[in-house]
Structure formats: structure tokens, C-alpha cells
Image (cartoon, coloured by chain):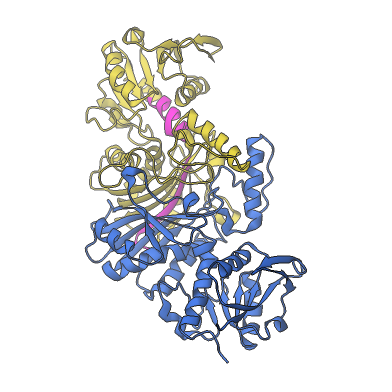
Chain colours: A blue, B yellow
Amino acid sequence: MRTYSIAIVGAAGLVGRQTLERLEERRFPVGKLKLLATSRSAGAKIQAFGQEIEVEETSPEAFDGVDLAFFAASTQASKELAPQAVRRGAVVIDKSNAFRMDPAVPLLVPEVNPQAARRHQGILASPNCSTIQMVMVLKPLHEAFRAKRVIVSTYQAVSGTGREAMEELKEQTAQVLNGEAIKPEVYPYQIAFNVLPHIDAFDEVGYTGEEMKMVNETRKILEDDTMRISATTVRVPVHIGHSEAITIDFEREVTPEAARGLLSQTPGVVVLDDPRSLRYPMPVEAAGRDDVYVGRIRRDLSSDNGLNLWVVADNLRKGAATNAVQMAELLIREGLLLRK
Amino acid sequence: MRTYSIAIVGAAGLVGRQTLERLEERRFPVGKLKLLATSRSAGAKIQAFGQEIEVEETSPEAFDGVDLAFFAASTQASKELAPQAVRRGAVVIDKSNAFRMDPAVPLLVPEVNPQAARRHQGILASPNCSTIQMVMVLKPLHEAFRAKRVIVSTYQAVSGTGREAMEELKEQTAQVLNGEAIKPEVYPYQIAFNVLPHIDAFDEVGYTGEEMKMVNETRKILEDDTMRISATTVRVPVHIGHSEAITIDFEREVTPEAARGLLSQTPGVVVLDDPRSLRYPMPVEAAGRDDVYVGRIRRDLSSDNGLNLWVVADNLRKGAATNAVQMAELLIREGLLLRK
């Protein structure tokens, strides 16, 4: 079987490690494997594919001979190094915010807009976690009923921020339970037993970067600039799993039953919607799974033709690593990976 | 000074104790004070107003000579005993769901619809916690700009469920941190490090009781049955303080600046809205305070004339005990308390 020379940039980070695990789990045809990171993590040894691999410091030369590079590092690192990797012949799947809104870069959720992959010029971007799980559900509904307006409030896990945030939540929680003083470091305020209506930086009209990602990325992925979208993104004291309360206004007539039927046939989406038996999606159940869970599907009471939905997914898997590996699988399937 | 003979039903519970504390804190003119509860709590001794008061078992006779009875017990207890208390000459301020939608019963937030108190026939109802903090902000905006449509997603603290839920969150959190097995009792699933899109029972179309309270109570309080409202109510692992992400469509032209100006002059509402300095409302800051905090006031991007807001309040104070004591203060001020 044809194998591919793979590099993972940010291999020591939370999403880098998840990417490695997903490659193994999904039996991705990995040939040579390079684990790259900043000098701080270089020299560390990581077990993968039955070997112990030493983490190397990222450099432009490191991409020589690499077919496919996953970037799971900072936006700054992607901006600097992804073009270098492409110049040396690699295809880049970037999980940062660096290129998502670049018109030359496909922004890809393989189940949603696979056709966009064909336009790639070396770099493909994976959307923000909160966008991915929303478009997975929005796409089939939009195709069938034409979504005009989307209002979303999120309940986002700390793992979206990284490993330090997961540690901070644990430590701070123990401190609060023990009545000890806390000292927030990753977040500006206490995250244990609190919620923060603040993810990413604020712009001049009061929206956060995370909120605007949900607006702009969704439009780009669905190729519909007329769709009106508004988001409130909120950090909650949950380790893994983002939840979203979504209200959608449709042009065409819609019913909860029709939506349920459609979504239950959507690959990658699992309908978990039997409230009378107390079945609805929750982060503790979605964590560790690749699917996007949707429930609480009901008529929106504030419009004539709308739905309310509750969507939950593992932000490290479908929200990040799984989506990136699925992008790579699509590239292979479509003969879009090797550029030489 | 004229004092009033007061009874508190459910005095041993979380909201009962809070009511007692608010009466003391606000120097309410309490004369005789009866603390009532079920037989389970009868005999317990509670410190209040410099005395030690023994909790008595609630009975119809217990209301003899009582001017004002606060009901902070179950809906069932209110249904059974509130009419008895009224028959014996007491005015009842009920915090349960028993009479809220009864057309003969005023549903009161003193800053919002004080005029409704005049119609009382012995029983007045205090709205649900999540409704109170929303209408505190919605009322002035509705008066100025005419709200047509309201979409709200909540982030509700466990203290809304009661003392056992607060204990469950603490114990379960410690168990999860220690890697021990958990056994949910108050909630159907793990609440530590999780979110539950489920508060109160589900109806046949998939809404919860809590969601329908927000819809129906808001319309009753604002005396506007044309306002369209939709809610998703969610329990989060927070001890005290409910948060709400609210989207409002208006008939008249609105700006964030105008809304901010109006709300900053609204008694009981505090505008905390300077995101560039990271100032926004949070449950850990709202807990222990009587005001309703509003921030993240910004144009809704999904409509031509809407706003998004983030509203936080202490669900045990303004959401329950404080509102009830303010209702009593209003009754005295307006000469509506004594019925004999």
C-alpha cells in the first residue's frame, strides 16, 4: 500500500497528540513520521505506531520530503512555516486561524463541502471547533429548508484553550473546594464553577474573535454570504466537549420530524433526541467520540418556521484532530495529496 | 414603627433561609416571626433577628395572626396551604410555580410591574428566577424600542435546584477529580464538569417546564401576549448565579449606546460592559449581590434591528428571596398588605 511521509507541527500539544492518536486509530497510511515542535519540546520522546519518536525542532528544512504536514500549533507558526512547507513540496492541513478566511485556501469539513478541496494550492484549513459541529448539522438542514438566520449560544470546554487550561480548571476546582485562594493564569478570571462570556479577543463593536469565526467560517463553508448569523461564545467549566444552543429560521417549511429524519441519515451526525426518556446530547457523553450529536430538536416558538437544536461534539476530535485526519483521507481518496 | 407578623414556609430550605437573611439585611419591620417547615425540619433552631427561633411544622392554624406569609416550599405545599393562609387573614407571597399563571394572581417584579400588585386578592407570585433577571433588562428596552422577538439561552446554577444539588455538585466534583465513580442522585446525569440541557420536566413538543416559564411568565409580566419568546434552559456546574445570552429583535430603531444609556438608569440593573477592559458580568461576581448585571451589549448581526445581551444575577437573591422581600416592601409602601 502506498504510504505518505507525514509531519505534525505542534506534536507535543493537545491537538498534535490527538492528531497522532487519530492517525493510528484510523490506520492512516503513514510512512515516515516527523514530530515537530518548538525548541522547548524538542528532544521529548513520543510513542506512536509502535516506535518511540523523538520530537524535532520545527525548521523549514524539516519539511523536505514530507508529503503532508498537519499544523497544530499557533497561528503565528502557521503563518511563518506553512508556506515554507508548501514550497518544499508538502500539502499543509492547518488547524490554526492563519488561513481560514484566505480566498485561496479551502476551509474544509469533509462531510459538508468536500468539493472545496479540489481548489487547494497547497494549504487547506480546518475550521474552528465551534464552527465544525454547527455546520455538520446546519448543512443538511440548509440544503433542504434554506436557513436564513442562525442564532447560536455556545458552552465551550476548556480543552479548546489547550493543556494548561485543562490543568487550570482541575487545580482551581480543587482550590475552590478546599476554600483556598485561586490565581487565574490562563483565563483572566476564575473558570472553576463560573462561566466566562469571552473566548478570544474583543473587536471594536463588542464581538469576540470566536464569535466572528462562527459567523464568517460558516458562510464560507456553506458558500452563502446571505445567511445571517449571530453568536455568543461562552467558556464553561467542562474538560472536553462543546455544546451549542442553535436557533435557525428557514425559508421553506420545516418540521422537527423532517429535521430529525434528515439528520439521522447524515454521516457523522447522531440524533440523540428522546427527551421523555431523558436522552439528549451532553459533553461527558460526546467526549472521546468522533460524531456530532444533536438533540432537543423542536419548533422555535419565536418564529413561524424555525427550529431550536442542541448540538454537542468532542472539540478535540471532530472539532480538531478528527476533522484534520478526515481532510487528509479525502485528499488521498480524491488524488489531491501528492503535488509533485 | 408599625411591624408585621411574618411567617416563612420552607424556612429550613435554601430560599427560606435566604428570605430570612434578606429580611434582616433590609431591616424589614418584622414583628412576630414564625418559621414553618415540614415535620422533617420541625424542631430545628434558627438564629434570626438576635433570637433563636424554633422551626414549627406547617399547619393551617399556624397562619392565625400572620400578616404576611412567604412561601418558599414546594408547588404542592403552596397549592394546599396558601389558600388556607389567606383564609386566615394573611397575604401570601409565593415563590413556587403554583399560582404564577393564575389570572387572579399578580406575578410581580417590583421594578417592572408594580401596578399589578394592586389587583391582588391575597396571593401574589414571585416569578421564576430565570424570568426575573430577563424581564429586569427587557422591560426598559421594550418600553423604549418595542421588543418583538426574544431568544434566550441560559447557563443556570445548581442552587436553583436546592441545597442537595449544591452538595451533589461539590461531592461529585471531588469524586471526578479523584477519579472515583460518581452516582448522580439529584440530577439524572453527572453535573460536575458537564452541562445538562434539561431543567424541569419535558412537555410533549420537547420544551421543558423551565423554558415555558420563561415564555409565559415574561408575557404576563410585560402584559404583552404578542411578544414571541423562545428559550433553551441549561444547567451548568456553577454554585450560584444564572447567566443568560439574550437576542432581542425590536420594532423601533435601537443602538447599543441607547440601550446602555437606558439600562444604566434602570433601578436594580447594573451595566457592566467594557469588554476591551475585560469587564462583563459573571456568576462568581454576581453571587451575593441583589442587582442584575448586564453586559456584552452589541448589535445582533443576524437582524437589522436587534441586540445581543449577557445578563447575570444571583438566582437566590434577585431570582428568589430579594424579589419576594421587595414585593413585601412594595405592599407596605402602597398600603396593600393589611387586608383586615
Q: Is residue B113 magenta?
A: no
Q: Position of residue B205 (x, y in %)?
A: 26, 47
Residue B75: quarter of image: top left
Give, as a single range, the part of the protein colored magenta: B302-327
At horizontal 41% and vertical 51% (from top left) the residue drawn is A281
Residue at far bottom of view:
A340
In screen coordinates, is B250 left or right of A97? left
**In this picture, residue A5 sits left or right of residue B10:** right
Q: Nearer the viewer, residue A339 or A248?
A: A339
Q: Which residue corresponds to the image point at 30% horizontal and 61% vertical from the top-left? A: A249
Residue B303 in view, yes or no:
no
- The residue that appears at 61% across and 71% down in the rendered structure is A75
Q: How far across and how far down the image is residue B54, in percent?
A: 49, 9
Task: Please tell me which residue lies in front, B159 or B69.
Answer: B159
Specify the quadrant that holds the C terminus of chain B: top left
Where residue A186 appears, as percent x and y from the top left, is 65, 54
Q: Is residue A56 left or right of residue B65?
A: right
